[in-house]
Image: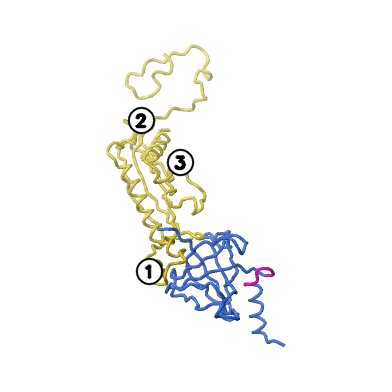
Amino acid sequence: MNFELVRDSVISILGAAEAGQYRTIGYQERASSADEVLGNLRSVQVFLANDTFPKSAGSMNLMMGDAEFTIVLSASSATELDLAVLEDDQSTPAEIAAAILAQQTAEKLASDSCEALFSLVWNTLNDPRNIDLGNPGLVSNRWTGEFRKGAPSRHGKLVAVLGEVSLTCRVEEIPTGEEVVNPLEGISGDLELKEDNIQESGVSNVYT
Amino acid sequence: MINLRELVEYNNKWILEDYNAGFGMPIELIDPDGNTQVYSANDPDPSNPTVLLAGQVVLHSTVVDAEGIPMVSDIRSVTLRRSSLDRIPLRTEKNQWTVKASELPNPTASKTTYLMERPDEGGEDIGIITLYLIRADQA
């Protein structure tokens, strides 16, 4: 179905914009270590959350599906401070105390990292060049409707923060039928289907 | 004959601080004022100390995740004998103490610098204190 094309396009678009700032993963991971998303190893997971087909959209030729993709943002961080001062035997107690006071906590750094990652993803997906997510004629109404960030959580010696972005769009779907079925196998005798002049059946060119 | 309090203190000494028979590993503590403790407060010769501060280093702990499933996490901690410390870390001094400890079971291995995320919630009654650590990176 076309939502699969769109999902792959979203992965490609985000992957092309990485520039070493994050990693794009094209599926939902069951679990990952906080070490795996440390610093610029932070990850972006893209997967389909749901796809709905309003009945009023019709059921003959084209169908319009409202696809919602979930983009999970994962980031982690350690506390940062001037270790050079702490590990220098010549440092005075006052210098060491100042270095400890000037630390940036892992909670703040991980939270900031997740928000910066959302900024990167949002700006990439909402670039006007990506209005159809690379699928002209198939996609409309792409919209990043929500960013939800979780609380910092301690994972071993690191702190991790997860965020979730909801990307919705309308995707044109064309039912292709079961590819393994040959309609001629179930028919005996001569068969002649006329051209479907009113273009409603969707089978006009199967056999003439 | 020693009493039970002295027996506990004796056990803490060889379990937590002895390099050969116990779990002892050299530890360095830096308090919030920047003062570094390298030698044990129990050193018999404070004017010319030679007994290094030592404690038990644990690199992994079993924790329960949000779904109630036990899992092993690399939550690091050091357990020290209270009487060996010049100053006892307080619960209000979160992220203000620095701990240098080795990640290898080798007393001569180089040390890694951590921040004390928090001290434990007990242990006073048997004379020990556990410090839970968080990794520190160069800013």
Q: Read off the residue under disc 1.
A: A98
Q: Say which of A28 and A104 sits in front.
A: A104
Chain ID, mark 1: A
Looking at the picture, which amino acid does disc 3 mark?
Gly
Q: Which mark is residue A26?
A: 3
Q: Is residue A36 magenta?
A: no
Residue at disc 2, secondary structure: loop
**Letter of the chain that mark 2 sits on in the rendering:** A
| Range covered by the magenta-colored residues | B16-21
What residue is shown with label 2?
Answer: A62
Disc 1 to disc 3, C-alpha distance: 44 Å
- Left or right of B136: which side holds B84? right
Quadrant of the rendering where the N terminus of chain B is positioned? bottom right
Mark 1, secondary structure of its residue: helix
Q: Chain of mark 3?
A: A
Instruction: Between label 1 and label 3, give the one nearer the viewer.
Output: 1
